[in-house]
Image: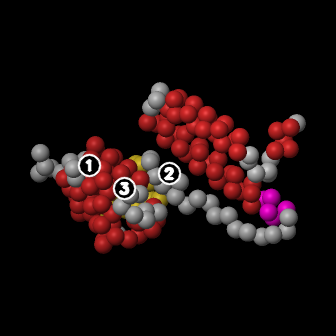
Amino acid sequence: MKEKSKIGKKKKPADKSNKKSLIKQLTTLLKDVDEDGISFLIRQAQVFIYNKKVDEHNAVIQKGVKITVKKPPFSDKVSMEIKEADDGSSFIFVINSARKFFTLQEMRIIVNMCNIATEERDASRRLFTWFKNNRGDVLNDIGIESSMDPSLATIYNYVSKRYKLKNSK
């Protein structure tokens, strides 16, 4: 019963030490969680944060004040899938709930950038610059705002592990 009375109240300084303890416990547990598990936990945290904002919004509405809460537009930037047309003439990137179509020529450019990049940051900068100059729709629809966006690292890791140009060694 006492726990319910705390809902909606500001946290006391003592709660900060409890939060630190919980973060430390979570960090210790994460050492034994694989990449898929961590991706799942990230998505769950994003859902939790979104739901918390909705609850705050609903509480404000009940008080008669209208505000808007937008659904987080870009919440899954670590999962990716590429679907290839049967004839190999086009590719569909599915990332962050966005489906982006690329021609074979565009895919060759992306694969080349990912293959010649020395590491994630290098690839992210190359991809961001190319998308900015040639396919701004990709940046907008996936929600990429800078070369540091995790979507670019996801694209690099996915493409570099699965695709090579026929002429590359």
Circle 3 SS class: helix
Please name the residue that numbered disc 3 is placed on. Answer: 152
Q: Which residue is pictured at 81% across the width and 69% down the height?
A: 65
Q: Which residue is pictured at 62% across the width and 35% down the height?
A: 22
Circle 2 SS class: loop
Q: Which is nearer the eye, 19 or 126? A: 19
Residue 144 rendering spot, x and y as whole percentages: 43, 62
- Report whether 150 appears left or right of 70: left
Q: Which is nearer the eye, 74 or 104? A: 74
Please name the residue that numbered disc 2 is placed on. Answer: 76
- Report whether 57 appears left or right of 100: right
Please name the residue that numbered disc 1 is placed on. Answer: 119
Residue 12 rendering spot, x and y as whole percentages: 74, 46
Part of the protein shown in magenta: 58-62
Q: Amino acid at mark 1?
A: Glu
- Report whether 1 appears left or right of 158: right
- Report whether 96 appears left or right of 92: right
**N-terminal-most mark, 3 or 1:** 1
